[in-house]
Image (cartoon, coloured by chain):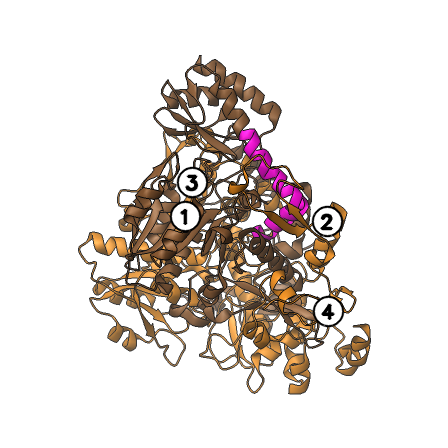
Amino acid sequence: MSDDRSESGNENENGNENGHDQARWTTNGQYEPLLSEKNQTRVEIGTDVDSPLPDDLTRDDLELPDLSEPELARHYTRLSQMIYGIDSGPYPLGSCTMKYNPKFTEDVAALPSAAVHPDRSPESVQGTLEVLARLQDYLGRIGGMDAVTLQPPAGAAGEFVGIRVAAAYHEHNGEGHRYEVIIPESAHGTNFATAALGGYDVVSLPSDDAGRVDLEALDAALSEDTAALMLTNPNTLGLFERDITEIAGMVHDVGGLLYYDGANLNALLGRARPGDMGFDVMHYNVHKTFATPHGGGGPGAGPVGVVEDLAPFLPAPRVRAVDGDGDATPAEYELFDPEHTIGRVHGYQGNWLVLVKAFAYIARLGDEGLTDASAKAVLNANYLASQVDYEVPYGPFHHEFVASAGEQDAADVAKRMLDYGVHPPTTKWPEIVSEALMTEPTEVESKSTLDTLAGAFNAVASEDDEILESAPERTAARRIDQTSAARNPRLSWHALSTTDGEGDGEREE
Amino acid sequence: MHGSHTTGSPYAPHTDDETAAMLEAVGVESVEDLFDIPEDVHFDGEFDIDARTERETRQLVGSVLERNDELTELLGRGHYGYYIPSLVDHLADRSEFLTSYTQYQPEVSQGFLQALFEYQSLLVELTGLGVANCSMYDAATALGEAATLADRTRKTSGHRVLVPDILRTGRRSTLENYVAGTDLEIEPYATAESTVDVPALESQLDEDVVMVYAENPTVRGAIEGRLAEIGERAADADALFVLGSDPVALSLLQKPSDVGADVVVGDASVLGLPTSYGMGLGLFATDERFLRQVPGRLVGASEDATERRAFTLTLQTREQHIRRERATSNICTNQAWVALRSAIHAATLGPSGLVELAARDVTRAETLADRVDALVGVKAPVDDRRHIREFVARIDQPARPIADDLEDRGFAVHVVGEHEIQLCVAGVDDETLEEFVDAFAEVVR
């Protein structure tokens, strides 16, 4: 690989003096081998390992990697070096709120006292219940909601709770016939998928010319069949839905509920609350707004807040305080089933280890910190946009903006940005902006990092298609062929040995 | 030391001078000018949450969590507290793993993709099925996803999903919610000795059934002996056979592909996570014929521009961000980091270590059953079956007060019936089990 790099190294050819060369481990011309390629053993059960069970209750054998601890330490360390994280550099993925994850929250989640079994008696896990109750209370205040459940293990699971709660509420009121959920075209894909999972027909709502909800279209879409309208505010263009009060009135007039997708809550902390805007139910993405780590795709947590009328429908069990009188006597906490509960959406109480980190984050920041987080997130998005050469067609935006790559292919722009040592924005979505570059720097970037990031955008903006199409070149792997991955799915090392052409000996059909 | 600001987010690095320079570049006087929020919905109140230093916050959380009693947990029923090797924490906590996002830019995410590919491969080996995704939330939601897969792929007009009558409430209720948007109905079938009552199941099985669910081991720790028959009966009725299990049990018990399982679900965080109040890792594996109906993310092998093998998320047209309301699931954020932990834990054990762990779970559970069975007024195990990890004991006295007495002596156990408690040995060392037997002998005396 080193020869490739010196030939086309963009430091020389393209004047790129910023960036980083990602670690790239190679062995015999291949990238880091799989565990199974390093060493694998087949053990026969009952022969190689004694079995206390008769043969008919056991499998015959098990073939898995067999490596020593030092070898494993090296394997996973090398893998980690071939990953870009928020601690590596800026990560302005729009809609994902990739903010710094404070290290101390890992320490509190790792406390031995946090490691409890979910079937413990409530009396013996008062600490866990207190954390949950206090987090529910924090989230209620932050969102302007009357009751909160922490059970949903992710944002989409929170959406599902919202949809199931809406269904139960309508059913309870003799309005179970409502079968439509209205969703703006620019919404997150999970909204559509969640409504469908709940058995609803999706009514897609176009945006108006300014990029917001088209009130006329909304009026036409609303009817006595409307169960709910799902809305993100600010929306995926970063725009505040200025007509939110009117929208809420229109939805409520036909008997529908208003759902708030909390993905963009980081824009509003301390300045606006979904509950005050007329939303009836919302989810919070604690892995976005409250800085719990994304962990390569999860775990997150998607607590749901509701107004008082919907509280009886929340998932069971919930946590509440009893007997407390403020500071003098610490409250006792208990679990209870809401009167008309929808039941469970998770085997237990969701992603506890994530929730405790979110609690710690909120307790650390307090009012001032949370309000400032939003202020700096919005400032950073606006400052970055002001420094970027790409056009930003819609505004005024808040914590994120959607630029257009214009004549360039946004996906290629993203690949090329990797060579400049930054993570690129979300691309090609929302579709309302052609060749979209959806950018959310969050509050954690300094002015100088934003300048570096803008430099990367602008350098790529001035490059030609040929350079873009051959990017990235400084990453662990070069451009990866998506088509062949999908056409010839190889999803395990077992599949590699049967379909790889190169010298693997046996082939099976 | 950084910064000339004293209030605000400790993780926003702006100095006052920088903020001023940025505002000037944007062309506004103050940050508030950037917010386009109408007056009538502007929040002017306070959350009334005090800011704290890092040290104060750690003290706060630590002191609250100290209210949790320190108990030895003989608890299982789907969530286990195995010893987690230090290597798992230290490697998984490397911040590149912890702080990266979903691998939408695979060129810069090869390490995580490879780890997830290896995790998928581990599950393929354990289940014998061709495809495993790189995680669902937990066992309950994975079961729900299996039912929606059965709904999408059914060959008949059937609408019944058969589940054991001893299924955990959390799993049953979650399943009910997942199928609420379909015409599927959940129907319990009888169990005998805590395992499938095959004749009873057969009497309920006809072409109106789209899915049969069984667990091995069952929630009461019993090992199923007639899985292949269940698989055959389900296939005869054109119903999907979904089997619930976990990576430790799968290391020793019958391979799901050998008993006709079409889908395997379960909780893979039995490896990789300590007890964590129910946080899990949804295992989902299925036969290759359902490849395009699989929920969640899949990592596949491909090649990069230098023709070297490289990994990427693949078959994304199944997923919500592409297919929206026609996606196979609404899942986006999953449990990737837990999958990494589970894979590292499995790797530290290796194949013999995994089989030995499961074998010890059989021997130790059955030994403990013998020990408590020797006590007057106790019968264990209640079920005339082989057991792994846990078993149910019948006690002549009411179970609840006995459990309370045990808790006073430092042991947590399940109460699963008026006169039944359930005991699990996973993660509890032999010496502590001896202490438990002594304490148990005292409280039932």
Q: Chain letter for brown? A: B
Query: Could you tell me how far apart the alpha carbons at marks 1 and 3 are, in whole angstroms?
Result: 47 Å
- Residue B243 position within the rendered picture, expressed as x and y whole percent measured from the top left: 44, 49
In the rendered structure, does residue B359 fall within the stretch colored magenta? yes
Q: Chain of mark 2?
A: A
Helix, strand or loop at disc 4? loop
Q: Is residue B304 magenta?
A: no
- Which residue is the site of mark 3? A133
Q: Measuring from the top left, give residue B390's x and y in whole percent.
A: 49, 33
How far is disc 2 from disc 1 in space, using C-alphas?
Answer: 37 Å
Label 3 residue SS: helix
Have a look at marks 2 and 1 and say if they share a chain: no
Question: What amino acid is found at the position of numbered circle 4 in the picture?
Answer: Gly
Left/right placement of residue A253 relative to residue A501 reads: left
Q: Name the residue type under label 3.
A: Ala
Dots 3, 2 in contact, CB < 8 A = no
Q: Secondary structure under badge 1?
A: helix
CA gap, disc 4 to disc 2? 23 Å
Query: Residue B220, percent across and down?
Result: 43, 35
Nearest the eye: A435 or A478: A478
Residue B41 appearing in the image: no
Q: Chain of mark 4?
A: A
Chain A: its colour in the image is orange
What residue sits 39% from the left and 26% below the top? Answer: B420
Q: Kindly indicate whether the residue at mark 1 contacts the one at mark 2 (C-beta within 8 angstroms).
A: no
